[in-house]
Amino acid sequence: MRLLYFAWVRQKVGTAEEEVTPPPEVTDVGRLVAWLAARGGGHAEAFADPRQIRAAVNQEFAGPDHPLRPGDEVAFFPPVTGG
Amino acid sequence: MARVRVQEGPFDAAAETAALVAGRTDIGGIASFIGVCRADDGLAAMVLEHYPGMTERAIARIAAAAEARWPLAGCTVIHRFGRLLPGEPIVLVLTASAHRIAALESCAFLIDWLKTRAPFWKREEFADGSSRWVAAKAEDDAIAARWDRAA
């Protein structure tokens, strides 16, 4: 699974992207956030407050209940501030 | 079909407007919005980050929503990324229609939804070298939501 990070999420995690292979019980976005937070370090800091995190799966906005499959591109970022 | 571009360089609003009406005689009005980098609190520059790929898809989807809702003859959205200085244009929205109401309303709709549904993030850089990420405003969500209620 390919993970992308943007804005302050990227800065806190310390990388813009990484490949991960979560355990089988990580079946949706919310569980992936919890799993990443449990990795500690920059990940724990970035995902400390899941309410501040938005996600996209395969380039579509996705909520915590959105299911995940191997090979998905999952992005995490703060609420958007364009325009 | 909307013209959507995400680019680092500047855009030419007059040329884009001319391109929108070229060869058409059914357009009665064009509305435009240009978002400009504002120098609040001693801001030296604004750095816009985006999600290449998703950004274009998200803007195209927002434009398609506008086209489904108003009878548009044309629509252009250009959003810049990278480092922008105060006074520099950030985003251009053009909407063309036979009549003004459709052009004006869809233009407002597009910029309201771009602010809340397109994956861009602004970081403000200040003269003293410090920087901060711009926080999303609840006010912008409320403004965008008025289009949900009116749907």
Image: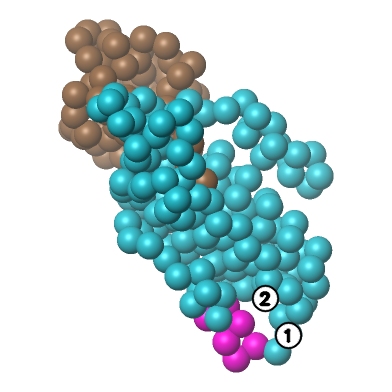
Chain colours: A brown, B cyan
Of B91 and A72, nearer the camera is B91
- Which numbered disc, 1 or 2, marks the residue that appears first in the sequence? 1
Q: In which quarter of the image is residue B102?
A: bottom right
Q: Label 2: how many residues lie within 10 Å, few (<14), some (14-19) or many (20+)? A: many
Residue B49: percent from left, percent from top: 34, 42
Relative placement, left or right, of A32 versus B2 is left
Q: Is residue B121 magenta?
A: no
Given the image, what chain letter belongs to the residue carrying mark 2? B
Question: Nearest the camera: B41 or B143?
Answer: B41
Give the position of the N terminus of chain B as an image quadrant: bottom right
Q: Can residue A15 be seen in this view?
A: yes
Image height check: is B18 above or below B95?
below
When the figure is inspected, residue A59 is found, relative to residue B7, above or below; the finding is above
Specify the amino acid type for callout 1: Asp
The answer to whether the residue labelled 1 contacts the one labelled 2, judged by CB atoms less than 8 Å apart, is yes
Callout 1: residue from which chain? Answer: B
Image quadrant where residue A67 sits: top left
Q: Mark 1 points at which residue?
A: B26
Is A12 placed left or right of A65 in the picture? left
Q: Which label number is shown at residue B73?
A: 2
Location of residue A22 in the rendering, given as x and y in whole percent from the top left corner:
24, 22
Kind of residue at disc 2:
Ala
Q: Distance between the residues labelled 1 and 2?
A: 8 Å
- Label 2, secondary structure: give it: strand
Identify the residue shown where x is 38% and y is 62%: B10
Q: Which mark is residue A60?
A: none
Q: What stretch is highlighted in magenta?
A: B19-24
Pointers 1 and 2 within a single chain: yes
Is residue A5 shown left or right of residue B78?
A: left
